[in-house]
Amino acid sequence: VPKLMAGKRGLVMGVANERSIAWGIAQALHAADAEMAFTYQGAAFGKRVLPMVQKLDAKIVQEADVESEESLDALFARLEKEWGRLDFVVHAIAFSDKEELKGRYVDTTKANFQRSLTISCYSFTEIARRALPLMTDGGSLITLTYEGATRVMPSYNVMGVAKAALEASVRYLAADLGPQGVRVNAISAGPMRTLAGAVIGSSRYVYRLSREASPLRRNMELSDIGGSALYYLSDLSAGVTGTVHYVDGGYHAMGMPPAGATGQ
Ligand code: NAD
């Protein structure tokens, strides 16, 4: 798909390392000739992310923590100054205290609930609001979600509630931004072995059962998510907004696991 993204400029938020979903998406976009700006969270991630994104010819690489309005002010001021416009945004950011991604959802504290929802859901709305004035020629935003938004998944707890709110935000944002030609969609990825994925209790069981019980009988790879992201961020999906698209090997379609699938 060379040239599919030629002339398009976008912001990619959420690369922590080579296993990050945002990194898989960035590689697909790079192969299609997109120009990208990257953010990383804090200096420790920066050390890892800087050499990675330099290989993709990124000129704008900036620290940004979505809990800090000042850091988002600085990021968008820089994008406006150096680019003046934006065609796409990839939001691949989520957080919960890992102690609350085990045990029962009912024990979620208010402090972690608020922080998880702020980082994992509100940040997408805030970034959409800040990106909109730069999307003078239309645009496309995507975020990453998981099926734990709609059905109970082991240990997903407060993240399930955050993802439900995130998926609802996708629909409200699509309605708000559509008249300006800006599209908003979510990719619901099957479980992946990333930094964020690993902190969820029972992740090994979830990973195995998702493989054994999905129609395609495999876990998702970064390139699977990258390919779907490319569709959403390019003009191939020009008529598509407000959707949640499953890239999970078909797991969501199953009413029951096939006989013999145990995840053990
Ligand atoms: P990851 O750990 O590689 O990425 C998560 C990113 O969130 C990191 O880059 C981290 O720095 C960033 N982040 C957290 N708090 C932040 C903050 N306050 N400010 C700025 N950045 C912050 O893991 P991933 O699995 O690639 O996660 C990316 C997205 O994909 C998340 O939204 C996650 O919920 C979603 N997702 C993951 C899976 C999975 O199984 N791994 C499945 C479906 C959806």
Image (tube, helix red, strand yellow):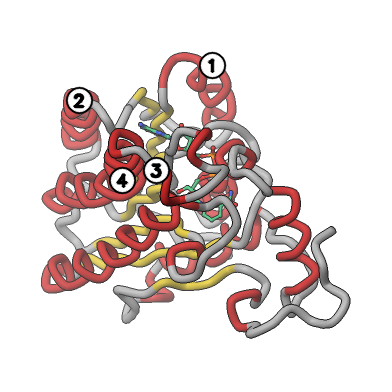
User: Dot 1: within a 10 Å radius of its alpha carbon, few (fewer than 14), some, or many (20 or more) residues?
Assistant: few
Q: How many marks?
A: 4
Circle 2: residue type: Ala
Cα distance, mark 1 to mark 2?
Answer: 20 Å
The reply to whether discs 1 and 2 touch (Cβ–Cβ < 8 Å) is: no
Q: Secondary structure at mark 3?
A: loop
Q: Mark 3 against mark 4, which lies toward the viewer?
A: 3
The correct choice, above or below, for 134 with respect to 219 in the image is above
Residue bearing mark 3? 108
Cα distance, mark 2 to mark 3?
Answer: 33 Å
The correct choice, above or below, for 137 with respect to 257 in the image is above
Residue bearing mark 1? 47
Figure quadrant of the N terminus: bottom right
Counting residues from the start of the chain, the first of labels 1 and 2 encountered is: 1
Residue bearing mark 4? 117
Give the left or right position of residue 256, taking residue 128 as reference.
right
Residue 69, percent across and down?
18, 29
Cα distance, mark 1 to mark 4?
Answer: 27 Å
Q: Residue at x 36, y 23 (%)?
A: 63
Give the left or right position of residue 193, taking residue 181 as reference.
right
Circle 3: residue type: Thr
Give the numbered dot on residue 74: 2
Q: Residue at x 48, y 20 (%)?
A: 46
Residue 163, percent across and down?
39, 57
